Amino acid sequence: MSYTKEIIKGLSWMGALKAITRLITFGRVAILARLLSPIQFGVFGVATMGLAFLETLTDTGINVFFVQKEGKLEDYLDTAWMVSIARGTLIGLLLVSTSFYVANFFHSPEAQIALSLIGLCAFVRGFINPAIISFQQKLQFNKEFWLRFSIFVVDTVVSVTLAFITKSAISMVWGLIAGCILEVIASFVFIKPRPRLIWNKLKVKNILKRGKWVTLAGIFQYLFANGDNIVVGRLMDTAALGYYQMAYRISIIPITEITDVFSKVTFPVYSNFGSEKKRLWRAFSKTAGVIALLVIPISILIFAFPTFIVNVLLGKDWLTIVPALKVLAVFGVVRSLSAVVPPLFLSIKKQEYVTYLTLASLIGLGITIVPFVSKFGIVGAAYSALVGSVFSVPVIFFCLWKVFLKKG
């Protein structure tokens, strides 16, 4: 099968997954927004930020390592699993031990329980069979579809059911934990080979050496994606954080989900092109064009009808987010088109380029976030995110020039 057909096949499966899960997500958000207050969404946001930060800080880049075919999956499987277990345990312990201080930082005592509990999610994830990456490596996106869909459904059912009972942010944390447990079970029942408790120091060093740029880029990406949330939660309050995160979610999810689908499919496909630059450029330019055609109309709809969207999806109690939603709709376009590039750079083993462009975004955000939020509140946070995404554009063009046009 040609790589074009592989891309189409992969996009069909992953596109179907995103379409179905996003429809369910809108339904879930509509229900939860009426069961839980903005403060509860803010509490959940604090917990997920803590989890994401530690997962990013300790990311080994092992999945990128395998997709790039740097090492055989079977040769590194046992060591990768041991590293994953150690990492998950460490993250869980850190979340529990620092929960009081993080909750205090955000002036949100309610977040302490959520932070401690979400540490269980990190611990459980550590036991996932690393061979699960073979679905991407072997372009088996049909299997990826059924796995991710099942996990999502379990997460949704548990979250909504417990929200009816508890009226608490903890319901969403338990949904995540349930999904993690299912993923661990499925990774051992349906995926081979299965790892063993064997540690190889040399293989660990090889993995970490190759993954350092991925880890650094991940840290910068986390800070860019969450820097606005952190400042809003710190300078304002948990309710403001809940409002802002909801606006961000509505504006960015329909758009970035498209780029996520393409990224997941194109990265392993690009990796098979090797040094064929002309072929790689054709595939990349076509992908960028298709994403632009899909993303821009969605963003225009969000920008033009924010009040209608908020009323239908969330209800009148959330109309506060409308001004921020309009700004974030523009941000979503720039962000999505920028997100086309990292899979290309990773496929040719230029992880450092991804780090450079994420650093540029972070600098733009860092310069503006505090003064903008202090003066304009959550709308200022939205503008700061937009400035950060624009900062990365010149870096992207420079790196593309080095890859495709620079001689020598």
Image (cartoon, rainbow, N blue to C red):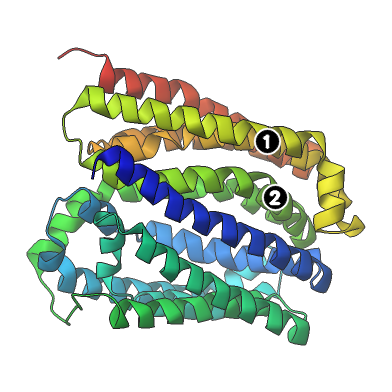
Give the vertical position of 327 relative to 47 (above or below): above
The residue at 56%/27% (across/down) is 390
Q: Which is more toward the observer, 38 or 335?
A: 335
Q: Residues within 10 Å of mark 1 (few under 14, many from 20)?
A: many
Quadrant (top left, top right, bottom left, bottom right) of the C terminus: top left
Q: How many labels sit on residues?
A: 2
Which amino acid type corresponds to the residue marked 1 in the rendered image? Answer: Ser
Give the vertical position of 380 relative to 53 (above or below): above
Give the vertical position of 319 relative to 184 (above or below): above
- Marks 2 and 1, Cα distance to the nearest angstrom? 11 Å
Q: What number is the disc on residue 299?
A: 1
324 vs 9, left or right, is right
Q: Which is more toward the observer, 401 or 208?
A: 401
The residue at 82%/51% (across/down) is 310
Residue 164 in percent (x, y) is at 77, 82
Could you say which quadrant of the image residue 75 lies in?
Answer: bottom left
* Label 2: element kind: helix
Q: Are marks 2 and 1 in contact (CB under 8 Å)?
A: no
The residue at 42%/70% (across/down) is 147
The residue at 49%/73% (across/down) is 151
Most extreme residue toward the right is 316
231 vs 32, left or right, is left
Which tag, 2 or 1, sits closer to the chain's start?
Answer: 2
Quadrant (top left, top right, bottom left, bottom right) of the N terminus: top left
